[in-house]
Image (cartoon, rainbow, N blue to C red):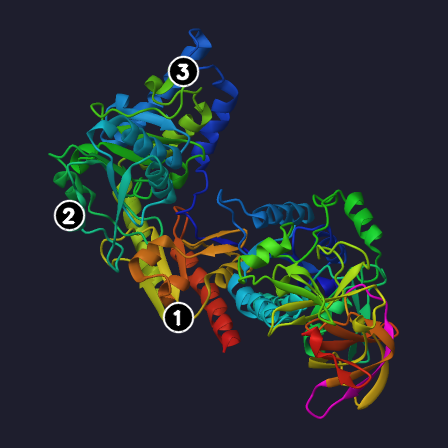
């Protein structure tokens, strides 16, 4: 049975061009970019070239890009690094209740260190209201962190408006743009953000490499110590193959974001049309302000873990926002924030996310298999 | 062999050596094997550490060695509602419950079985030491060949309908052999220590655990004649026949728990293992399950009144109200309400029931609680 991978919001396959660039880099660019000999200089050049490309993809300056091990580290560095550096100006942080755990758990950690965090609610469509940000702001607020596109339901947050709101406030503004990267043209000036997180593996790049954009004027406390790399903001010998792969992945979409968006939109339209032939479902998230990469569907009356296992055995790879570690099922914090914990939609939500190589035929095929599974499970339950 | 490929077997995997070998044997026999870890109890500590996480990691390692898919499911709610609530209720009533029997009945061979069937399973398999004999459309539950490990006692509540969908691949093996198979195949769990005690209590102190859920009411310890022997920590902490942990010194011992008076909160003790108060000759039992219905209203069998006890001869009478009256060939010691009585004819486990009342010479021993 051929398998259908519909979990691109979790991670994407490596683009063949990326893979090829990385293979070459693995054997040829072994020099340490900090070394002063030829081999080192060659590697340093590769890092700098990559930095330029990533900066360009964000409308930023080269100097403002800090390579990290991925989105989680970039979020940690942004949040904890800002909080530690700015705590003399206040100890209040604002974020939303639907952030990625990299953000939420960093905030939880800061709460144990004497910071106060406001977790903004969302409406039923999963969007943070600009008014709620305004209401939560105080003179003590030093950081606002709101994601650009939610990774579970795909809702797009009003980042630009929040940026505008914070223009004259002391608070540093961070956005986790991991899910927006590659399908939304990003410009840190337009968005008026100070910190922005991206990662390579969601855009057909390698795992283990990401970046934090940091506006030059904004100071942060490093989390790592031990070298001059990344201007001491993130010491450690550079992940050269990762950086080179990251660059290649970004070059593939640079300037193509809107075309990619259109590709995904077309897929999603087909998917939604098909999935709507299944009885008793809801599609979660805002109808308009939503990523074309993600479709979050609740199959009412089913249980997430049962659906996921059955689909897996049928060769359909999807996920849910709920964490299932060693059998501990905690329902999705995002859907909980939207609907409440016991809501039938929260208990039965499955995320489908689309990929570059997908075709409309794959949309039809996946829904066919999903429909069979859902109908079988519903029959069993009765 | 080719047929086995079409047969999907979901193995309940705990991360222990028995269920690991269960999966291995089925895989070797060519079945379409899926490993599933059940999480029935949340024991996460303040640091976020949870033994289930470690056990599940072992399941993952073994499943990867065997190249079979694996999943984890959560039955915490069902376990709480069906097993733990029963467990506490029985203690509140002064009885000694058997949560393993209930777990098999309600979780492993009900919630888990249903889940497995929803995944298209033809069978579920577990690492229990018990055997199934399938002959002429009939199914019988047999003791495991390893006398010391036989677990039919805990499986006594399973019906024919359930057992038809079950496999016990270890039943014909001695435990030693199971370990050896694990070692020979270098399974990740080959050297893992067997778990002991009640699963949700684990290695913790039983008293401390129970006191977190039930208020302990200390009271007096007395002999059946009313001689005060000291203080007890709460009746629920003691079981009939118990010798250790009574804290009674002085001459005349050793002392044994022989009964409980729930109303007056008194724990009864008597001296000597062979004191008459521990002895009984009949019992009344409910929650009766026979794997296959038994037509005779009265029949001879052997029985166990607790796990790992030798069988004793009994005469069983099925009463019109669905309960059983069980007469012992010889007096038995420390037969305890709340525990299971399980019946056998030779190697066949007929089924079992829960002990409600215990009798001697026609009189109910109400001091047993």
Do dots 1 and 3 share one subunit? Answer: yes
Q: Residue at x 58, y 59 (%)?
A: B210
Label 2: which secondary element: helix
| Snapshot quadrant of residue B189 | top right
State yes or no: discs 1 and 3 in contact (Cβ < 8 Å): no
Please, is residue A223 above or below residue B364 in the view?
Answer: above
Q: Which residue is mark 3?
A: A227
Task: Give the structural element (helix, strand or loop) at label 3.
Answer: loop
Numbered disc in front, either 1 or 2: 2
Is residue B164 in sight in this rendering? Answer: no
Tell me: B178 left or right of A96. Answer: right
Q: Residue at x 38, y 46 (%)?
A: A356
* Magenta highlight range: B307-323
Tell me, yes or no, if residue A117 can be seen here: yes
Q: Earlier in the sequence, mark 1 or mark 2?
A: 2
Vertical placement of B75 versus A333: above or below?
Answer: below
The Cα–Cα distance between marks 1 and 2, rounded to whole angstroms, is: 41 Å
Residue on which disc 2 sits = A135
From the top left corner, tell me how far across and down residue A314 is, in percent.
Answer: 54, 60
Outermost residue to the front = B227
A127 with respect to A38 (left or right): left
Picture coordinates of residue B311 (x, y %)?
A: 86, 71
Q: Chain of mark 2?
A: A
Q: What residue is at 18 percent from the left and 36 percent from the top?
A: A140
| Residue B309 lies within the magenta run | yes
**Which residue is situated farthest in the top direction here?**
A37
Q: Which residue is the extreme one toward the bottom?
A: B320
Query: Closer to the camera, B228 or B161?
Result: B228
Work out whether A288 lies above or below B107.
above
Chain bearing mark 3: A
Numbered label tally: 3
Distance between the alpha carbons at the discs numbered 1 and 3: 56 Å
């Amino acid at each position: 049975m051929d398998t259908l991978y519909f979990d691109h919001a979790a991670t994407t396959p490596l683009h063949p061009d990326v893979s090829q660039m990385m293979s070459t880099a693995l054997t040829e660019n072994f020099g340490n970019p900090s070394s002063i000999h030829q081999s080192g200089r060659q590697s340093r050049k590769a890092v700098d070239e990559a930095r330029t490309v990533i900066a360009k993809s964000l409308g930023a300056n080269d100097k403002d890009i800090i390579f990290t091990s991925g989105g989680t580290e970039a979020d940690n560095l942004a949040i904890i690094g800002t909080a530690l550096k700015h705590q003399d100006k206040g100890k209040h942080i604002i974020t939303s209740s639907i952030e990625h755990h990299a953000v939420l758990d960093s905030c939880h950690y800061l709460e144990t260190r004497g910071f106060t965090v406001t977790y903004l609610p969302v409406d039923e469509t999963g969007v943070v209201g600009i008014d709620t940000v305004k209401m939560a702001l105080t003179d003590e607020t030093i950081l606002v962190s709101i994601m650009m596109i939610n990774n579970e339901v795909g809702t797009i947050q009003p980042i630009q408006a929040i940026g505008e709101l914070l223009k004259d406030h002391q608070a540093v503004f961070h956005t986790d743009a991991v899910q927006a990267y590659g399908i939304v043209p990003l410009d840190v000036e337009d968005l008026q953000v100070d910190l922005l997180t991206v990662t390579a593996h969601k855009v057909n790049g390698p795992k283990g490499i990401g970046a934090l954009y940091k506006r030059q004027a904004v100071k942060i406390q490093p989390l790592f110590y031990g070298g001059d790399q990344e201007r001491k903001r993130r010491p450690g010998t550079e992940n050269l193959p990762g950086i080179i792969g990251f660059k290649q992945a970004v070059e593939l979409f640079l300037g193509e974001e809107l075309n990619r968006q259109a590709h995904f939109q077309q897929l999603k339209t087909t998917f939604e049309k098909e999935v709507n032939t299944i009885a008793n479902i809801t599609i979660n998230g805002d109808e308009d302000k939503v990523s074309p990469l993600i479709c979050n569907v609740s199959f009412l009356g089913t249980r997430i873990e049962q659906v996921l296992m059955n689909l897996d055995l049928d060769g359909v790879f999807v996920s849910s926002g709920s964490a299932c570690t060693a059998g501990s099922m905690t329902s999705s914090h995002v859907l909980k924030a939207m609907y409440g914990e016991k809501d039938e939609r929260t208990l039965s939500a499955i995320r489908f996310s689309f990929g570059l190589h997908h075709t409309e035929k794959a949309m039809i095929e996946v829904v066919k298999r999903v429909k069979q599974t859902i109908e079988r499970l519903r029959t069993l339950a009765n | 062999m080719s047929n086995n490929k079409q047969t999907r077997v979901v193995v309940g995997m705990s991360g222990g050596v028995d269920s690991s070998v269960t999966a291995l044997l089925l895989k070797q026999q060519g079945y379409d094997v899926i490993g599933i870890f059940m999480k029935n109890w949340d024991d996460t500590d303040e640091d976020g550490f949870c033994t289930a996480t470690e056990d599940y990691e072992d399941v993952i390692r073994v499943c990867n060695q065997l190249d079979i898919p694996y999943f984890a499911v959560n039955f915490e709610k069902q376990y709480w509602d069906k097993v733990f609530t029963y467990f506490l209720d029985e203690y509140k009533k002064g009885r000694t419950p058997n949560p393993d029997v209930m777990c098999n009945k309600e979780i492993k061979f009900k919630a888990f079985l249903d889940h497995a069937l929803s995944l298209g399973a033809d069978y579920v398999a577990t690492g229990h030491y018990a055997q199934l004999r399938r002959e002429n459309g009939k199914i019988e539950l047999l003791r495991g060949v390893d006398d010391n490990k036989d677990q039919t006692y805990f499986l006594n509540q399973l019906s024919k309908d359930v057992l038809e969908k079950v496999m016990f691949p270890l039943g014909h093996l001695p435990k030693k052999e199971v370990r050896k198979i694990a070692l020979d195949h270098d399974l990740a769990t080959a050297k893992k220590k067997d778990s002991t005690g009640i699963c949700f209590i684990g290695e913790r102190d039983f008293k401390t655990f129970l006191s977190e859920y039930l208020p302990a009411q200390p009271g007096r310890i007395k002999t059946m004649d009313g001689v005060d022997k000291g203080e007890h920590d709460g009746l629920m902490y003691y079981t009939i026949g118990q010798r250790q942990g009574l804290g009674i010194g002085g001459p005349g011992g050793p002392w044994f728990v022989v009964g409980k008076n729930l109303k007056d909160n008194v724990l009864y003790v008597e001296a000597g293992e062979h004191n008459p108060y521990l002895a009984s000759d009949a019992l009344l039992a409910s929650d009766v399950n026979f794997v296959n219905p038994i037509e005779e209203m009265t029949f001879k069998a052997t029985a166990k009144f607790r796990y790992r006890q030798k069988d004793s001869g009994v005469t069983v009478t099925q009463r019109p109200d669905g309960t059983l009256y069980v007469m012992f060939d010889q007096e038995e010691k420390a037969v305890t309400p709340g525990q299971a009585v399980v019946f056998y004819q030779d190697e066949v486990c007929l089924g079992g029931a829960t002990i409600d009342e215990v009798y001697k010479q026609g009189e109910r021993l109400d001091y047993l609680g």
